[in-house]
Each structure stands twice: as C-alpha cells, then as structure tokens.
Image (tube, rainbow, N blue to C red):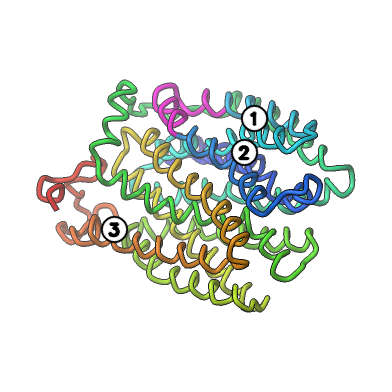
Amino acid sequence: MEGVKSRVNLALATMAFGLSFAVWSLLSPLAPQFQKTFQLTDTQTGVLLAVPVLLGSVARIPMGILTDRYGGRRVFTALLLFSVVPVVFMGTISSYAMLLFWGFWLGIAGSSFAVGVPFVSRWFNARDQGTALGIYGVGNIGTAVAAYLVPWIAGSFGWPYAFWAFAPLLATAALLFWLLAEDAPGAPKAGSISQSLEVVKRERLSWAFSLFYFVTFGGFVATSAFLPKLLVDWFDLPKIDAGLRMAGFVVLATAMRPLGGYLSDRFGGARLLAGVFSIAPLVAIGLAVQALGPNISTVTVFCLTLAGLLGLGNGAVFKLVAQYFPRNTGIVTGVVGAAGGIGGFFPPMVMGYVRDHTGSYALGLLLLAAFILLCLAVDYLVLLRHGRGASVGETPSTKPGEKHPEEGSGSLSKKQSAA
C-alpha cells in the first residue's frame, strides 16, 4: 500500500498536524507578555499555559473515536475549520478571564494528533508504521514555528495579529485536506462507541502506553511551554532569545521522533523506551541540581539531551500503539494521546506552584525523574519481561520473518494478564 497515495496522505497529514500544533502552542511565546500585562503570579501563568493543553488532551478521546468511525479526512477538515474560531477571538481579549476562556478553546487544535495517527497508520504495513508515524510526528515542529514567529509578529504588529495570522492558514489547510486527502482503502472499521471504549478498559497495554506517553509527550509539551519562562527567570534572557532557545528544544525533539519510529521498527519499541527511561531521569536530576545555581551552558546541554530522549520516546510509543491495536488505533490513540496531553497540563501548574512556594524549580524536576523511573519499571514488567520488546515479526519466541502470534491484537495472553 506504500505508494504515491500513501506518501501524499502522509505529507498532508503532517502539514495539517504541524499547523494545528503551532496553533495549540500560541500562548507559550506570549506568556511573559501576558504575565506583565495582566500582572499574573507564576501560578496564574502556569494555569494559562496549561489550559489549552487540557482541552487538547481530553478532546483526543472523542476525536479518536470519530476518526475510527468516519475517517480522518472528514474529521481533520472539520477540526481545522473549528480552530479558526478561537484563533480569531483570542485577538480580542481584554482580561485574564477571557484569556483563559478562549485559551481553553484554542486547545482543540491539540486533539489533531488522535486524528492523524489512525489516518496515517492505515496507509502503511506493520513493519513501516513506526517510521511513517515518526515522520507524521515531525508536525511537532509547529511549536518551534510558533516560538519563532509569534514574538516577531507581536513585536511588529501587536500581539492580536500573532493569533489572527493563523486564521487564513487554517482555512486554507482545511480546504486542501478536504480536496486532496483520502482515507486508506479497506481500512478496518471500529465497532460501536461502547465497544471501542471496552477495548481500552480491558487492555492493560493501553494503560501502559498511556503512562509512557504521559511522560514522553507530556514532558515535551510541558518543557516547551514552560522553557521560555524558566530561561527568563534563571538567566534574565530577552523574551525573543528565550523563545528561540525553546524552538531549538522543539526542533531537536521533533527531529528525533522519526528516528524513534525507525529504531522501533528495527529493534522494538519497548527496548528503545527502556533506554530512554534509563537515561532521562539522570538528566532531570541534573536540571534539578542546576536549579540551585544554574549555568546556561550546562542547562543547554541538559535540555537538548532531554529533548532528544523525549523525541525518541514519542516515536516508540505510537509504533507500539499501531502494532498492537490496528483495528482500534483511533480510540487507543485518543486515550494515549489524552494521557500525553494531561502530562503536559499539570507540570506547568506544578512548576509555577513550586516556584511560588519554594523559590526554586528543583522539586518539580525531581518529580519528573521519579515518573520516568516508574515508566522504566512498567516497561519491564508489562513488555520486556514477557518478550514483547522486539520488533514486529522478530521476537524471542519466533524466528526472524515469522509473525508474532499476538501482533495487531492488543490482547494479553492469560498468562500475561495474570502477571
């Protein structure tokens, strides 16, 4: 199936996802300005940064279900059109309350991930899904685009235009997607909504993948959202400089996502995650130490290392989702993606709260290290211990080239379920 059509649809989905992600990230580069304009505390600013993430996370579940039932072409087009509304009204706000209200609805663009993953994965076979989804994940670069463009637009024309500039882009993308994209022929149809939810309820793997994405993608979203403020607080950097450094974090994490998918195709997603979850806690602890006396060169190295690890982890998780849940990719993507979004929702608020009450970000960074270590334990207990860490068609229980007996089912054997 991997012909011209598959590549065209992958390109369209990546374009739409990148634009949606840029819209989802519009508040982050402007947070220092809004904090000054509305005289917000660190906690209030953290809430502002977290609000779009909340809707973008929760909405992934219904968006995944709708994509399973009606196809990505229809759902993605509708999502792009709907996103025009909050983008327009964000440029009219005059109070913190209205900023929170329209910032919440701005988050609908973040649910696009649960639409694109099932749309893309069904155009590719199991051996290449990780690579394809990793390429789709390059749409994360939208965060870097927002970080680079928004401060410039706001400084040149006023901050309302930083939002309004995206309205025609969204409308154009919706038209292109409707005219040029198409759903994969013969794509499996999900059952009823209750049946789709039952899959998530009974499958332990879906909850394990949710935890993994809570940390890998949540860590990416939270860090990219909070990094400009952290850099301004630690080093008193100009806002544009801080935004550009955040863009570098996003670019590296995004570039590593296709590599994570490719390595997962070749060596297994669970094995790759084990490596990520072994190294990342050391980086988080290093940043916690830096919080006591930060050095910009050391912080840069730690942040870029964390970006690379989180990008690899993002690519690995959705290789596993597509591998074990081919018929219900949308709903499982929605639930796992929601967990990842929620993982980006809480940290900015926690970091703001910790800073307000302790004067340091150290405790928040130590909590990140603890969550990553929990993921390492779950990865071993649920996947690696049962020989589920290898690539598709090549596991300890099969010869190279043979199909794994559980490939694509998402089900656990009785022996594994009892473990």
Badge 3 element: helix
Residue at 62 percent of width and 29 percent of height: 80
The span shown in magenta is 61-76
Query: In the figure, is residue 362 to the left or right of 62?
Result: right
Instruction: Say which quarter of the image contains residue 157.
Output: top right
> Mark 2 = which residue?
20
Q: How many marks?
A: 3
State which tag comes first along the sequence, 2 or 3: 2
| Residue drawn at point x = 36 percent, y = 26 percent | 186
- C-alpha gap between disc 1 and disc 2: 8 Å
- In percent of width and height, residue 88 lies at 75, 29
Q: Is residue 66 magenta?
A: yes
User: Mark 2: which amino acid?
Assistant: Ser
**Residue under pointer 1:** 83
Query: Where's the N terminus, which quadrant?
Result: top left
**Residue located at (61% from left, 56% from top):** 352
In this rendering, the answer to whether 123 lies above or below 223 is above
Check whether the beta carbons of the residues at disc 1 and disc 2 lie within 8 A of each other: yes
Q: Residues within 10 Å of mark 1 (few under 14, many from 20)?
A: many
Question: Which residue is label 3 attached to?
Answer: 378
